[in-house]
Image (spheres, grey):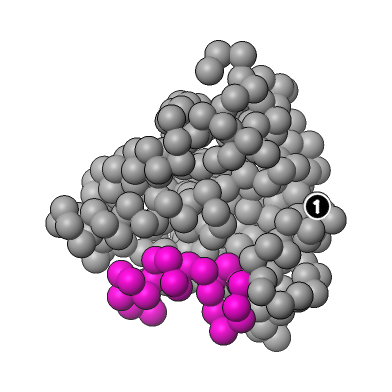
Amino acid sequence: MQVYISDNYEEMSALAAGHLNLFMSQSSSPLICVASGDSPAGMYRNLLQGVQQQNWNAAHWNYVGLDEWIGMNGTDEGSCRYHLNRQLFNPLSVPAEKICFFDGRAADPEAECATAESFISGHRGIDVAVLGLGLNGHIGMNEPGTDPASRTHIAELDPLTVQTARKYFETPREISGGLTLGLGTILESKKIFLLVSGQRKAAVVKALLEGPVTPALPASLLQNHPGARLYLDKDAASLLKTN
């Protein structure tokens, strides 16, 4: 895993966006896995600026969503799709056929999982997977203890994840579970960008980099991935032995 430490969140976001554009430009029809959340949001802003001001070309990109809350889709304020519509899909005018995203309101959630796996295999795998990091070390909605070989599945959520998720909703919502790409699916990606910011993530970043590789901390599985890149701001890196 390559680690990049920036002085602040904006520098981290700009660096990751530049690297993302570089890798995605190497394929004629690349597939990116996109995560919602606070940490990747700045990278998406920089990506949009690159497209609008520097002639970056994202017209040939394809997208698969990382996860979604059960019972929600893009029509629900605070859902994963809702945020990515605002941050990425709508500003880039991405055609619907280039996006595969979980519909948490679908009557058959297992079919949603199968559709995501089929979309990924149909594009010969994920070129770049963009991830955030949960306070308990989860990636996507793969909570501690998830099988490292897991495929896309319906996830039971840790109480800490449910508590943290409340900040995304202006009005209270019941969160009963999620749909997520599995750890095995994510680890097959050619490149993985893990973006982490803020002092409150410093302890889990330290455990990720300096502790053992274990399913008890799902993000630690990225340590041995040859294409994994960890982007940190100074606050998130503040507890590392070598900063």
Mark 1, other Cα within 10 Å: few <14 / some 14–19 / many ≥20: few
x and y, in percent, of residue 33 in the image: 47, 56
Q: Position of residue 191 (x, y in %)?
A: 43, 41
Left/right placement of residue 175 relative to residue 42 reads: right
As for residue 86 lying within the magenta part, the answer is: yes
In the image, is residue 72 above or below residue 236? below
Residue that badge 1 annotates: 160
The segment highlighted magenta reads: 73-98
In the displayed structure image, the side of residue 27 where residue 87 appears, left or right: right
Q: Amino acid at mark 1?
A: Leu
226 horizontally vs 169: left or right? left
Q: Is residue 225 above or below residue 177?
A: above
Q: Is residue 57 magenta?
A: no
The quarter holding residue 89 reads bottom left
Q: How many marks?
A: 1
The residue positioned 73% from the left and 36% from the top of the image is: 217
5 versus 189 height, above or below: above
Secondary structure under tag 1 reads helix
Who is closer to the viewer here, 158 or 6?
A: 6
Q: Locate residue 219 relative to residue 91 in the image: left or right.
A: right
Query: Which SS does the magenta portion mostly show?
Result: helix
Q: Residue at x 45, y 73 (%)?
A: 85
